[in-house]
């Protein structure tokens, strides 16, 4: 028998419940996060049009650069000011 | 594992012996004589009845006394005063034993002098096990038992710990030996490793360095590389997550290159040198195992590259006509450094006919213009690994690094009209507003030159980079902490 040392980070992830899916978007605030890739804005402009048509209000956000995770403050702002979020890749 | 407390040596005269030592057997009558006349305790390492079954013979069955009190030779004669065991003799010498014990006429029938034998506690087949047992190991990684009927390599593969190549089982003995390569404590935090943002200790780096196949003397390079990779400016997360075929490329400079036997010559970018092949791999295994960055997870490379197994090489500083790469980045010649460049695999820069610095430089520019796409400018940097024969053109012409880079960059200015989207019927390209501009292929300071390779071959190599600058990844050089 060989005993080896675990090479991993030994993470014990916590399981969290997802927020319940809203029945309707009417009256909700939806955040649109542009990750700052080319033409992400084109896609999100169209999504905003459709959402507004469904009675949702829309808040637009963007990451400083697509190469790095969204800053903590930005994630916090989205979480506390929006009911739902759509993140857009593009190219 | 809990630390073991060193057992105290008996007070007064003590002899440490083993039966499997001709000198110990030879002096057995002297030991009995000393026990009678001077009061002696014998610590026997192997046979508990050697040299006698007596209350003055103690069996060091687990070698704890021998290991903790640094017995290297048997017989060793000690005069123990409390905690002080420094007064000692090794081997047999009648004159010295008589003086040491204050006893005359010892072993009068014996030869005057005989060397001792190796202590069991320094037996190469036992030292790893003893170190694990007695070093007071503070290693905290979870122990994983691989069953006797399991194959070690298959078991590690099944747990997702491998990059696809075999890994060396990181046993505690191997990890402890690896840790001897650094003066840093095993529990010291080296970096917070993306993408899972896990605090990574020296111990976890050592575990992965063992698996990659590193020797202990490589560990300081690996530790520094992990630190450099996990800085905000290098942006390892982005480098991992990108769909481009890139990873951290390690370039080592300074005295450590020769000290650990790195290759800066023939086939330096290829296989065959242990340090080159395993240091970059160790960093990648840390990202994979500690950080949780795996292909198909956060690693989204469309096609990837064999260089992502780990790409690491050293500069041939002594053979270069120029300052070293590390010097060009502001470090002293005597400093050992590792540079992390966010790059892809190397490709060939072919020129067998240029005999002047001017011709070779123009040709380099033509080749370097095509990195990623000839239509992409100022977004990526590059490393040129210049071969000795190409370097000779600049040595002959008296060009230094600055002259070379000035001339090269001058040949890398491109007319915007040639590279805007739509030019020549090709939809890829720069935006329309650059149409009337002249643009440099590489951003300022974006061409790094490292000298290396064999002395035969008019070939150099280029390693293209990923998105440069604050929006992407910045090349990082760090001095290697021993």
Image: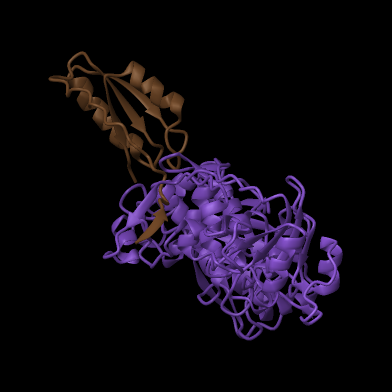
Chain colours: A brown, B purple
- Farthest residue to the front: give it: B36
> Which residue reaches farthest left?
A23
Q: In the rendered image, is residue B89 in sight?
A: yes
Q: In the rendered view, does B364 fall on the left or right side of B143?
A: right
Closest to the observer, B130 or B256: B130
Q: Residue at x 73, y 46 (%)?
A: B83
Q: Residue at x 67, y 62 (%)?
A: B71
Q: Nearer the viewer, residue B243 or B114?
A: B114
| Quarter of the figure with the C terminus of chain B | bottom right
Work out whether residue B221 or residue B9 is closer to the camera in this orientation and state it. Answer: B9
Q: Position of residue B287 (x, y in %)?
A: 45, 51
Residue B386: percent from the left, percent from the top?
64, 72
* Residue B438 placement (x, y as % from top left): 59, 54
Residue appearing at x 49%, y 47% in the figure:
B236
- Asked if residue B129 is positioned above or below residue B367 in the image, the reply reads above
Name the residue rendered at 61%, 82% in the picture.
B458
Position of residue B271 measured from the top left corner of the image (x, y, whole percent): 50, 75
Residue closer to the observer: B477 or B81:
B81
Whether residue B432 is visible, yes or no, is no
| Quarter holding residue B64 | bottom right
Quadrant of residue B217 in the image? bottom right
Q: In the displayed structure, would residue B268 be above or below residue B216?
A: below
Q: Is residue B362 above or below residue B471?
A: below
Left or right side of B136 for B149: left
The count of marks equals 0
Q: Quadrant of residue A43?
A: top left
Please give left or right for residue B294 compared with residue A50 in the image: right
**Would you place residue B386 above or below residue B172 in this image?**
below
């Amino acid at each position: 028998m060989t005993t080896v040392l675990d090479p991993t980070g030994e993470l014990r992830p916590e399981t969290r419940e997802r927020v319940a899916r809203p029945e309707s978007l009417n009256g909700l605030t939806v955040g649109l996060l542009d990750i700052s890739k080319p033409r992400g804005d084109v896609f999100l402009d169209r999504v905003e049009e459709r959402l507004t048509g469904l009675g949702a209000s829309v808040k637009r956000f963007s990451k400083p650069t697509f190469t790095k995770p969204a800053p903590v403050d930005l994630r916090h702002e989205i979480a506390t000011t929006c009911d739902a979020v759509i993140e857009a890749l593009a190219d | 594992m809990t630390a073991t407390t060193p057992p105290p040596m008996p007070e007064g005269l003590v002899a440490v012996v083993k039966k499997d030592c001709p000198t110990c057997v030879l002096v057995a009558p002297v030991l009995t004589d000393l026990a009678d006349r001077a009061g002696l305790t014998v610590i026997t390492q192997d046979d508990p009845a050697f040299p006698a079954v007596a209350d003055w013979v103690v069996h060091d069955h687990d070698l704890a006394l021998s290991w903790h009190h640094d017995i290297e030779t048997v017989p060793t004669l000690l005069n123990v005063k409390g905690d002080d065991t420094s007064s000692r003799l090794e081997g047999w010498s009648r004159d010295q034993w008589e003086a040491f014990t204050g006893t005359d006429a010892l072993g009068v029938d014996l030869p005057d002098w005989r060397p001792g034998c190796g202590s069991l506690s320094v037996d190469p087949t036992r030292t790893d096990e003893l170190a694990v047992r007695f070093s007071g190991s503070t290693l905290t990684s979870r122990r994983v038992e691989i069953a006797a009927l399991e194959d070690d390599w298959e078991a590690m593969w099944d747990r997702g710990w491998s990059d696809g190549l075999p890994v060396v089982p990181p046993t505690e003995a191997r990890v402890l030996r690896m840790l001897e390569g650094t003066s840093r404590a095993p529990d010291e935090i080296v970096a917070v490793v993306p993408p899972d943002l896990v605090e990574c200790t020296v111990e976890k780096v050592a575990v992965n360095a063992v698996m990659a196949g590193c020797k202990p003397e490589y560990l300081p390079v690996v530790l520094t590389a992990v630190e450099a990779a996990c800085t905000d400016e290098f942006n390892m997360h982005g480098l991992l997550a990108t769909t481009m075929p890139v990873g951290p490329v390690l370039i080592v400079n300074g005295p450590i290159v020769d000290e650990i036997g790195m290759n800066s010559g023939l086939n330096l970018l290829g296989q065959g040198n242990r340090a080159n092949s395993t240091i970059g791999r160790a960093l990648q295994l840390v990202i994979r195992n500690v950080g949780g960055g795996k292909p198909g997870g956060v690693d989204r490379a469309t096609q990837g590259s064999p260089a992502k197994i780990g790409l690491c090489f050293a500069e041939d500083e002594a053979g270069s006509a120029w300052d070293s790469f590390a010097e060009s980045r502001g470090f002293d010649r005597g400093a050992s450094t590792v540079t992390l460049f966010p790059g892809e695999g190397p490709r060939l820069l072919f020129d067998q006919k240029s005999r002047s610095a001017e011709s070779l430089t123009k040709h380099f520019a033509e080749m370097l213009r095509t990195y990623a796409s000839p239509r992409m400018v100022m977004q990526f940097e590059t490393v040129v690994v210049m071969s000795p024969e190409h370097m000779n053109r600049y040595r002959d012409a008296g060009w230094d690094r600055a002259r070379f880079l000035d001339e090269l960059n001058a040949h890398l200015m491109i007319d915007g009209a040639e590279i805007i989207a739509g030019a020549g019927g090709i939809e890829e390209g720069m935006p329309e507003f650059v149409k009337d501009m002249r643009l440099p292929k590489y951003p300022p300071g974006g061409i790094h030159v490292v000298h290396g390779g064999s002395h035969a071959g008019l070939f150099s190599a280029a390693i293209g980079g990923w998105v440069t600058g604050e929006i992407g990844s910045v090349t990082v050089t760090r001095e290697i902490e021993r």
